[in-house]
Amino acid sequence: MSKKQGFGGGGRGFGGGMPNMGSLMSQVQKLQAEMEKAQAALANEEITVTAGGGAISVVVTGAREFKSVTIKPEVVDPEDVEMLQDLLLAAFNDALARVKQLEEERMGSLTGGMGLPPGLF
């Protein structure tokens, strides 16, 4: 194998050139700072979901912190506690799903299809 056909001759790698490590680190640091800024903004957002036609209302932040739960009195039936439990579970699960969707929208725009695993930054 000649030097030109080798795996790194002249500072070139498999794809025709090795990226400058300093530049790459700078880009990673910039992306990390942008991700942190987006996460902070997301944490300040509140999402409200309802279940049971508005009988249950749940407010959650983008940081997955539940802020409030509102239950209309007519839904509280001591003879049917299971229905109330089901409505609460539906509301909480919907709230978490919407936070995840919002998170993916915001963070996905930063990583732009880089295929990075969630939580990397």
Image (spheres, rainbow, N blue to C red):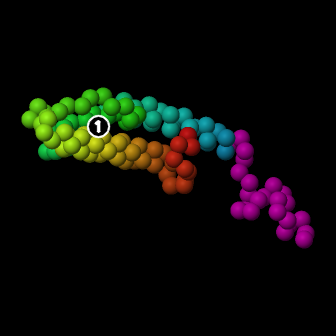
- Using the rendered view, name the quadrant where residue 69 is placed: top left
Say which element carries label 1. strand
Outermost front residue: 79
Q: How many marks?
A: 1
**Nearer-the-camera pick, 18 or 66:** 66
Q: Is residue 3 visible?
A: yes
Q: Position of residue 82 (x, y in %)?
A: 21, 43
Going by the numbered disc 1, the residue's amino acid type is Ile
User: Which quarter of the rendering shows the N terminus?
Assistant: bottom right
Q: Is residue 49 left or right of residue 72?
A: right
Q: Is residue 84 left or right of residue 18?
A: left
**What is the magenta segment's predominant secondary structure?**
loop
Residue at 67% from the left image edge and 45% from the top image edge: 24
Q: Position of residue 66 (x, y in %)?
A: 33, 31
**Nearer-the-camera pick, 35 or 58:** 58
Residue at 14% from the left image edge and 35% from the top image edge: 78
Q: Is residue 23 left or right of residue 7?
A: left
- Using the rendered view, name the quadrant where residue 90 is placed: top left
Outermost bottom residue: 1
User: Which quarter of the rendering shows the C terminus?
Assistant: top right
Residue at 51% from the left image edge and 47% from the top image edge: 118
Which residue lies under the disc numbered 1? 47
Write the start and end of the magenta stretch as one range.
1-23
- Residue 14 is one of the magenta-drawn residues: yes
Q: Is residue 83 left or right of residue 100?
A: left
Alpha-carbon neighbours of circle 1 within 10 Å: few (<14), some, or many (≥20)? Answer: some
Residue at 37% from the left image edge and 31% from the top image edge: 65
Q: Is residue 87 visible?
A: no
Q: Position of residue 13 (x, y in %)?
A: 76, 59
Outermost left residue: 74
